[in-house]
Amino acid sequence: MSKQKKEQRRPIKLTKIEEYLLDNVEKKHLLASLAIVLALIAFYYLTIPQKIFYVDVNGIAHYSQNRGPIVFSEKFLSDDSDYSISEISFNSNGTKVYGKLWVPKKTGRHGAIIFLPGAGGLKEAGIDYANLFKGKNIAIFALDQRGFGQTIGDSQGFDAEYASFLQGKEYQSVLFAYDALRSFDYLSQRQDIDSSKIAIVGESLGGRNAIIAAAMDNRIKMVVGISTGGYGLPLSNNLNATRFIRSIDPDAYVPLISPRRVVIFHSENDNLQPYSIGLRTFNYAKEPKQMVKVYCKSHGLCSDMSGIVVDQIVKGLNP
């Protein structure tokens, strides 16, 4: 029989850090050195941007609030007597997101609104809010959400999103909210914006995304949903399916916004989504909250809402 060579164990080596500690640190200083190392680790996780996404046991999706600075491009478009108007773009999780920004010409730091249009709506619809808030010292930042306008994105569909969820990957319903969070980060970086006075406003699909984003980041001052509400999806006996359903339903997130203000606007004569869905979401919300019922025969912002929207946001940003 041929002799089998004995397997030789590879020698254990010390890392450079271990060599330094063993050569230079006396035992009596070891605890102090370990404390310094732990402090450095804590500093890293608290100050260095961390890309963290997970869905908890209750089906609530989370992103880190420490998302770091955002690199953006700004293209000046025009100005008028009230606003300087620019096109903004930035990278958000691999997608280039486009927005349109109206900044008041008045000097100083301004409050701001992140506006999320409904499905098919474009950032240009932000002009409606810019006109409403003239003279109120509030900037408007309107987005082309994923899959609409200049922002590229494909609708995954329910089954595809669920498959991504099961793999622990992000999916479009939560990425909508992430783009809104990065919009908040962008506005917060600006020297002419007061980061403590940023509201998020959404119509229809945008309202759903606004509610989820506001629940994810408690620095967003208030949320206004217009012609919007949760899905009312039935829960499943399957634990994973239930968690997924809750992770995309604004009704699961709206109670988490308190003690910040939630205002829901909905028309009793909405021609696309019934008033009852907005009322259901309002009932899930905690105080402070307000439900505003109007009677226009349309979906989205209408003249019956306009003045009240302005009053609610101005008071909410300047209590």
Image: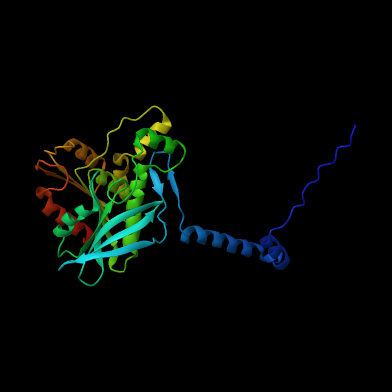
Give coordinates of residue 117: x percent, y percent. 23, 48
Residue lying at the far bottom in this picture: please name it: 107
| Front one among 306 and 117 | 117
Give coordinates of residue 144: x percent, y percent. 28, 51
Q: From the image, which quarter does the C terminus lie in?
A: bottom left
Left or right, 220 with respect to 42, comes to: left
Residue lying at the far right in this picture: please name it: 1
Q: Quadrant of residue 243?
A: top left
Q: From the image, which quarter does the N terminus lie in?
A: top right
Q: Which residue is depicted at the point 27% across and 53% down?
A: 143
Indicate whether 15 appears above or below 240.
below
**Numbered disc total:** 0
Left or right, 93 with respect to 83, comes to: right
| Front one among 69 and 41 | 69
Q: Which residue is depicted at the point 81% across and 42% down?
A: 7
Give coordinates of residue 101: x percent, y percent. 25, 60
Indicate whether 182 appears above or below 105.
above
Q: Quadrant of residue 83?
A: bottom left
Q: Quadrant of residue 130?
A: bottom left
Residue lying at the far top in this picture: please name it: 237
Task: Name the image colouring.
Answer: rainbow
Indicate whether 100 appears above or below 235.
below
**Is residue 175 at least partly visible in the picture?**
yes
**Is residue 218 at least partly visible in the picture?**
no
| Front one among 129 and 90 | 90
Give coordinates of residue 191: x percent, y percent. 31, 69
